[in-house]
Amino acid sequence: MAGKVKWVTDIEKSVLINNFEKRGWVQVTENEDWNFYWMSVQTIRNVFSVEAGYRLSDDQIVNHFPNHYELTRKDLMVKNIKRYRKELEKEGSPLAEKDENGKYLYLGLCVFHRLMFSVNIPRRPVQPWIMILSHRFKKCVPKDSKTSSFVSQSNKEAYVISLYINNPLLIGGRKFDLRLYVLVSTYRPLRCYMYKLGFCRFCTVKYTPSTSELDNMFVHLTNVAIQKHGEDYNHIHGGKWTVSNLRLYLESTRGKEVTSKLFDEIHWIIVQSLKAVAVNASPSLTSSTANDRILKYNLINDTLNIAVPNGEIPDCKWNKSPPKEVLGNYEILYDEELAQGDGADRELRSRQGQSLGPRAGRSRDSGRAVLTTWK
Amino acid sequence: MLQEESDLSLIIAQIVQKLKGSNLYSQLERQAWASLQRPEIKLESLKEDIKEFFKISGWEKKLQNAVYSELSVFPLPSHPAAPPEHLKEPLVYMRKAQGSWEKRILKSLNSMCTELSIPLARKRPVGEQKELLNKWNEMGTDEPDLSLFRPVYAPKDFLEVLINLRNPNYENGDSLSFRTHLGLIQVPLKVKDIPELKECFVELGLNIGQLGIDDSTQVPPELFENEHVRIGQKVLAQQDSAAAQQYIRQGSPTALRAELWALILNISSQPEDVLYYEQLKTNVIQHDLLVDSLIYKDVKLTASNDDYYFVFEDYLYQVLLCFSRDTSVLSHFAFNSASPPKSYIRGKLGLEEYAVFYPPNGVIPFHGFSMYVAPLCFLYHEPSKLYQIFREMYVRFFFRLHSISSHPSGIVSLCLLFETLLQTYLPQLFYHLREIGAQPLRISFKWMVRAFSGYLATDQLLLLWDRILGYNSLEILAVLAAAVFAFRAVNLMEVTSLAAAEKKNHLRELKSMSLDDIVKIHGLFWLF
């Protein structure tokens, strides 16, 4: 008997609930028999914690993989990248190549030397670093070397120190970051999708690398949660641009090759990070502007279409490769089965400008993008 | 035959006259002198040898581009005895209407001036100058009190004036016939009909590939896109304006657009041009103009709130404030039906020696003016180049969208073309909208006045402006506006009021429309 999918959520967001209801799915409580549970981060942690001993049955789906939090925790990412590198080395993969000094060419980590701080020398250009608290995603304001002590939030927590890039790409004189949505439907084989409608978030204040402005949060941190409180925050557009605008701007002002290379490299980083195994925690489902609400509604809609095709009751034995029509605004970022299947040059080019797909092993000699199959 | 010849020699004489004063002329002279050193230049065949040298070195091409540019911009001379007003606008009643409209604008500006007790212009104290110089790259963060300023006029005010235009020599007659024009514009100007449009816009026909349409997902790139890009690169390598203009009729690849437009508009960004821009910047620093506040207000009201253009707010100030002070813009009034407003030094009213044009470039910005600049920010991020491109676009095209004239690319003709197309080919829709008090022009007017900037998504808008440059005409705006109505005809038939027709959804829809949609489904294919 083909029943309706039974759903539960502990997040009261309209973009979720409207999507469930429009599919005619049935809302149940978590104690009842459910098929689809959109869990908050806390709940996921409980469900998948060792003590819980909870096991999903074959007809149940949740919105995160057990180790999803590893991608958001920078310290765990470091561990994962190191482990991933070792695995690749064992396989003899070109990605694990090192140069003559033993430094990894593609998967290298910055080495933090105390000596990189200038020692109380006025007007000497400082290389700022950014300190990231490992648990919550709170970024500290980058400190420069003038004080040798740092304000620590808690003695026990691990910090990750990251090189701060002093000359970011600016548009209209402003710094921006990218918010991209990636859906992973399976890890082994890796199948992931990139939402075409990602966006850029702009700072409201002009960027300046001067030391005096290091303390000005609005210049450096593009997080909307922070920008929202700046005086110049605009509630109509929310300081956001679509990725396609970014693409148009870059192609128009810098040319197609450079732009394509940029996006390829972004996609490469994403796929490699996923392979190093970790998944982001919950993206914000709060909508800040009307456009934003529409975007997130459509995002969840397309997500559900891929994760729960045809609204059928989940079955873990599925062949989980959905047909092209249900992708909506997602594009295939990487499909391991397809990539390994015929081993041929599979290039999925999207006419809207984004070149995604299993374009593999960058041989980075002289920056030529060579299309080989990812291993 | 004789007439043609004398026309031609008149044109040549005019162009030579214009180019003689240009930088290109002195460069050519210098090059000619320098070439005398070359072994291939022989005294016996001096003229031919130098000509040959120019050809090989690419200078002839530069000259060709300059001539082509003049031909595109300057209207063809009419009767040699025609007075200069005729070059501005041949029809008397149009001239008169433009004159009274200008008087109204100026009155509005002056009264705002008096009410607020702000001078039209004032020299900035040194402290203020320094401050402005420091803030030059982020004038957007300034929050001057603009609440008392209002835009001098908005497109809908202008529309009312156009609606009331009448040709005193033309008797419309009270009886309705099938010839009666049901639209708002009631002047008998000649506009193209479909067969004429087809002939004119032949490259937009079904059988010819288009960017924005034939590079969509379903069409493999080998069929059109790749070849088109290759040709574009070749055109750029040749640096040929005329070829570029022809090429761009099929749309420009994103990566080539900035260069192509510069080539078509004959903008080459010489050091003198950068210097000129810097000079304008200095003028801005030293003097404050009342129109500056109008510009600020306009940017804050329009571009700052736009999804695409808010990023470039600061560039808009850098361009528009300089634009207001650029007296070289005054030369375009020779063929613009409008005339620059004149003002007099205090106490010297009526004395011509003390007359000045205000603002210095003679152009008073209206609500939405900054949207002419905004899309260009996607192409040029160097301020002086951005400035030059905008200025050239203005004196070739945009001025026609807010002055009253009989020119085929003038806003009056565009409105009439739009209404005629709709009435002829979608009479049921036209009639229905008219009945519910939603005259189509009331909806589409603002699209056309702004050349669709802020109404279409940027990538689509740029494809549209490609065609404006390619055909050296704004008629495509009217055609597109009609096509949008055709595209949405079914929905519009169900609408019951002007408000409903203009609802926000409708506007948002326009932003999500692509030329692909409009052309394929009903729109232009229906026309062509």
Image: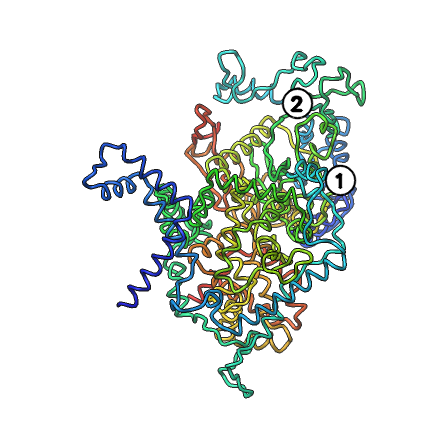
Where disc 1 sits, the SS reads loop
* A327 in relation to B484, above or below: above
| Type of amino acid under label 1 | Gly
User: Which of marks 2 and 1 precedes in the sequence?
Assistant: 2
Residue found at the very far right of the displayed protein: A154
Give the total of numbered labels: 2
Name the residue tied to disc 1.
A230
Observer-nearest residue: A334 or B26? B26
Q: Quadrant of the N terminus of chain B?
A: bottom left
Q: Residue at x 53, y 53 (%)?
A: B329
> As shown in the figure, which amino acid type bears the numbered disc 2?
Ser
Q: Of A367 and A354, which appears nearest the observer?
A: A367
Position in image of residue B289 (x %, y %): 67, 50
Q: Residues within 10 Å of mark 1 (few under 14, many from 20)?
A: some
Do tag 1 and tag 2 residues touch (Cβ < 8 Å)? no
- Give the spatial CA distance, label 1 vs label 2: 26 Å
Image quarter where the C terminus of chain B lies is bottom left
> Which residue lies at the image location 73% right of the left edge and 28% below the top edge?
A139
Frontmost residue, B448 versus A106: B448
Q: From this viewpoint, is residue A62 visible?
A: no
Q: Is residue B55 above or below residue B362?
A: above
Residue A219 on image: x %, y %:
70, 34
Residue at 51% in and 75% down = B423
Q: Position of residue B491 (x, y in %)?
A: 59, 68
> Under tag 2, what secondary structure?
strand
Q: Which residue is mark 2?
A: A162
Q: Are marks 1 and 2 on the same chain?
A: yes
